[in-house]
Amino acid sequence: MPDIVEQFPPCKWVVEGKSFTFAITSIEESYSNRLVPHERVYRDGARLDDTGSKATVWTIAAEFYNDLDEPGVTFGPSVQYPDRVDAFTDSLKIHETGELTTPTRGKRRARLESYTRNDTADTRDHATVNLTFMEDNEDDARQQEFSGVNGAGAARKAAEEGTDAGYSEGAGGGFDMSDLNEFASELEGLMNAPGNFVGDIEAKANAIQRKVQSVEDTFTRNKNEAETEVTLLLTQPSASFALRRMRRSADIAKKLADKKAASQQLGITTVTFPRIMSIYDVATKMGQAPQELIVLNSAIEDMLRIPAKTPVTVLDTPAVRNAKGGDQNASAA
């Protein structure tokens, strides 16, 4: 019976447009939960709270050598050492999240944690690279939440789910969590507004973060310091959902504010297209939020049917500049 591992396809790493396919001799996947034990006097063992999981980690041993005949590995074997391994290790020093494709799990968003490279005199034109990648949980679906109106809606929904779950677990008792929902709704309103309110958005995002921290401080400390048995309201396993949703609301709000502030630091430019486009088509093609483009192009009469060759104002990002300089259907107006 053939060895299953020998039938594995190679790994692939893509970061900032640079792509590398490489042979591997082993791959290890590790996963762990963040468990918080609560030990009690005169009681064996501990009550465990599951506060989520740590990042999934892949440890990979990669091989680069000039007589390589691994199917699927791009570039000829003669350039594997030193050219290809040098370029590969250089790409690992780019401080960006990339796309790691493994033979066991397929595509995952990941970032390199560390690598070690071993070249020895015993083996000519050969290098072993031991890699440790950590998964980035901001997958494509999550990333879409952080654009314009969708992101604000996700923050509001997470806040509502968190506060509802918190009240159902007994949190409250005179402590009002409803203003967290109000802050998130106001943030959604600001993101929907036909204008730029960067300062207000930042202030509202900060208010959401402070409120979530206040809830956490209030309901995860001792209910009554004088009681013999400590009660931690929102750290019970059944209540972990409440805090996790509130924290998610705060995280989304912060990312929205950061993204909005960053967009205001960019210049603007115009592009034209050889065919009829909607503002949503332009947003997708340029990798920008539709709401931002609607604000920038208020003079266009029909956002759903923009005539060909009409100048469309967009943020002057590197992606836009690349589109203008490449073969894509976008050009400077």
Image (spheres, rainbow, N blue to C red):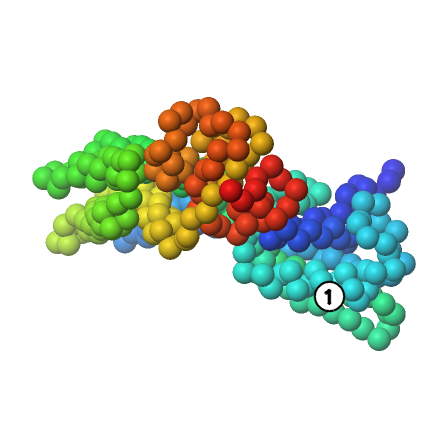
Q: Is residue 99 left or right of residue 54?
A: right
Q: In which quarter of the image is residue 2?
A: top right
At x 19% / y 36%, what residue is drawn? Answer: 182
Report whether residue 142 is seen: no
Image height of 210 relative to 139, above or below: below
Q: Position of residue 34 (x, y in %)?
A: 43, 50
Image location (x, y in percent) of residue 171: 19, 38
In the rendered structure, the answer to whether residue 138 lies left or right of residue 70 reads: left
Front residue of 149 and 42: 149
Q: Nearer the viewer, residue 226 or 252?
A: 252
Q: Is residue 315 visible?
A: yes
- The type of residue carrying mark 1 is Asp
Residue 275 % position (x, y): 56, 28
Residue at the outermost left position:
174
Q: Nearer the viewer, residue 192 or 308?
A: 308
Would you name the residue on which mark 1 appears? 86
SS assignment at label 1: helix
Residue 222 as seen in the image, left or right of residue 24 = left
- The quadrant of the picture occupied by the N terminus is top right
Residue 158 placement (x, y as % from top left): 32, 36
Q: How many circles with numbers are drawn on the protein?
A: 1
For image coordinates 43% across by 41% down, the residue present is 313
> Which residue is pictured at 71% across the width and 43% down the height?
103
Q: Residues within 10 Å of mark 1 (few under 14, many from 20)?
A: few
In the displayed structure, 218 sits above or below 62; it is above
Residue at x 41% of width, y 35% of height:
290
